[in-house]
Image (cartoon, grey):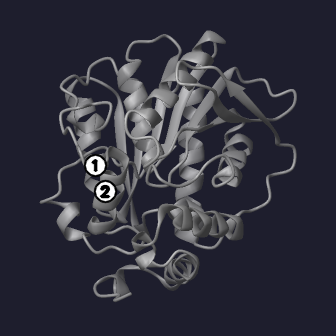
Amino acid sequence: MERGKYQAMLDRETWDYIHDVERWFPPDILDRPVDEQRKVYDAMCRAFHADRPSGVRAMDIAIPSADGPVRMRRYFIPDGSSSVVVLYFHGGGFTFGGLDSHDDICAEICAGAGLAVISVDYRLAPESLHPASFRDAVAAYRWLGDQDVAILLCGESAGGNLAAAVAHAARGDRHLLGQVLIYPDLGGQAGSGSYLEHAHAPLLSLADLAVYRSIRTGGVMNHQDPTLWPLQDSDFSRLPPTVVVTAECDPLSDDGRNYTGRLTAAGCRAYWRNEPRLTHSFLRSRRTVRRAQAAFEAILADTSALAKGSWPY
């Protein structure tokens, strides 16, 4: 790719990561059939997968819902004492990913924050258009709430959208402890701010984003639907304590700023951290890029603090 202004903005470790991703998942991949794209994406995820931390166990389960079973994977530390569960929604543009694609990240959240994590295998587009993924996310939340545990929502990219949409749908619920959103797509409108400044950012461009959004909706987008775009909700009251972490070199970074602004204006606790000189998907580089490792450690600290009922900022 043409490095342009990112030549100076991104360090060598980050460029090495970008090149590793593009060797597996090249920029022109979106021109191929979806089933072929998924095979390539899954192969990339396997190549980047790190071993689960020792002591973390995992168990696959399926829960009933009105739309059929929803598969999930529970990560836990035997004899762990916390009653808080992180409900995690993976990234992948609503088109890719599943229980295996973010398996190591979930396991490391479990170990690093000392919390049980449940990853949700929500339905993907284009086979299942919006609101299918949202309905699966809500079903997972309601099932977990029926277990009478405190729930901390967490999601990355597309999963950040789902986590926020669930938080809005569940506002005021006594089980909802907080949310941690990692470079989420919350439905900001292209045409200003980071959408212009980083329209050609490595690993997620504005053109890429438009493709993923179109696939998710079948090309029919209602920009006033908060289950699709949480940022467009008219009510931001009674939402839980929220930490949003974005990457500076990402068209979505202003979604984090604007979302936390709406929350604080409504009297909610919210904090936005825009990680400098990082790109979309930086969690996958946490083992090789020092900036990403520090950002991940901060996310773990935020998650742990929210689980304890304390506000870290």
On the question of residue 117 being in view, the answer is no
Q: Name the image quarter holding residue 250.
A: bottom left
- The x, y position of residue 167, in whole percent, is 41, 26
- The x, y position of residue 126, in whole percent, is 43, 49
- The x, y position of residue 26, in whole percent, is 48, 79
Can you name the residue that lies furthest to the left here?
191
- The x, y position of residue 177, in whole percent, is 51, 22
Q: Is residue 164 left or right of residue 180?
A: left
> Above or below — where is 11 with respect to 239?
below
* Residue 113 vs residue 187, the one in the foreground: 187
Indicate the secondary structure of the residue bearing disc 2: loop
Residue wearing tag 1: 255
Label disc, if present, on residue 179 of the rendered structure? none
Q: Is residue 228 left or right of residue 12?
A: left
> Is label 1 in contact with label 2 (beta carbons under 8 Å)?
yes
Count all numbered tags in the image, as a single digit. 2
> CA–CA distance between discs 1 and 2?
5 Å
Q: What residue type is disc 1 on?
A: Asp
Q: Is residue 148 left or right of residue 37?
A: right
On the question of residue 12 being in view, the answer is yes
Residue at the location (47% across, 39% down)? 180
> Above or below — where is 269 with respect to 288?
above
Residue wearing tag 2: 252
Indicate the secondary structure of the residue bearing disc 1: helix
Residue at the location (63% across, 73% down)? 288
Q: What residue type is disc 2 on?
A: Leu
Looking at the rendered image, the quarter that the N terminus falls into is bottom left
Residue at the location (31% across, 56% down)? 253
